[in-house]
Image: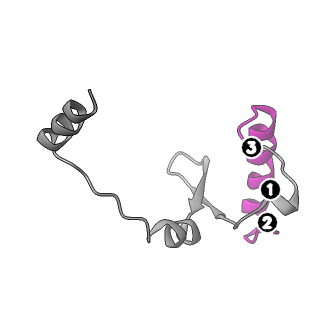
């Protein structure tokens, strides 16, 4: 997927990506391993540096259906006692 932005954003994005690859923050993978794309975009900070922002809307939609039920400490203690 190609980065979409201004020429300056594209240049800074390439520089940032090369640095992340050198630091092993980004790992190249095969196209078959990709489940979905998380888009990124660049924002210029007040000090003139650039920040890469991850747009995780698609990921959030995927995991929105998972519901986690939290138990209080009393329920957890009772469960532990039953398992002893």
As displayed, is residue 50 above or below residue 58?
Answer: above
Mark 3: few/some/many CA within 10 Å (<14, 14-19, 20+): few
Q: Quadrant of residue 65?
A: bottom left
- Callout 1: 10 Å neighbours few (<14), some, many (20+)? few
Point out the frontmost of discs 2 and 3.
3
Q: Can you give x and y, in whole percent of width and height, for residue 77 in the image?
A: 17, 34
The residue singled out by tag 3 in the image is 26
Decide: few, some or many residues near mark 2? Use Cα within 10 Å; few <14, some 14-19, many ≥20. few
Residue name at image x 16 percent, y 45 percent: 72
- Checking the image for residue 11, the label placed there is 1
Q: CA distance from mark 2 to mark 3?
A: 22 Å
Q: CA distance from mark 1 to mark 3?
A: 18 Å
| Quadrant showing the N terminus | bottom right
Magenta stretch bounds: 1-25
Q: Which part of the image, by quadrant, shows the C terminus?
A: top left
Q: Which residue is mark 2?
A: 7
> Residue 48's spot in the image, x, y percent?
59, 48
Of residue 47 and residue 56, the one placed in the foreground of this image is 56
Instruction: Identify the main secondary structure in magenta.
Output: helix
* Mark 1 or 3, nearer chain start: 1
């Amino acid at each position: 997927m190609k980065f979409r932005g201004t020429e300056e954003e594209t240049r800074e994005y390439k520089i940032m990506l090369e640095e992340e690859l050198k630091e092993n923050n980004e790992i190249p993978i095969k196209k078959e391993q990709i489940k979905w794309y998380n888009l990124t975009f660049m924002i210029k900070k007040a000090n003139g540096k650039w920040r890469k922002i991850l747009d995780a809307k698609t990921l959030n939609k995927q995991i929105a259906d998972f519901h986690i039920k939290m138990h209080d400490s009393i329920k957890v203690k009772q469960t532990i006692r039953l398992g002893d």
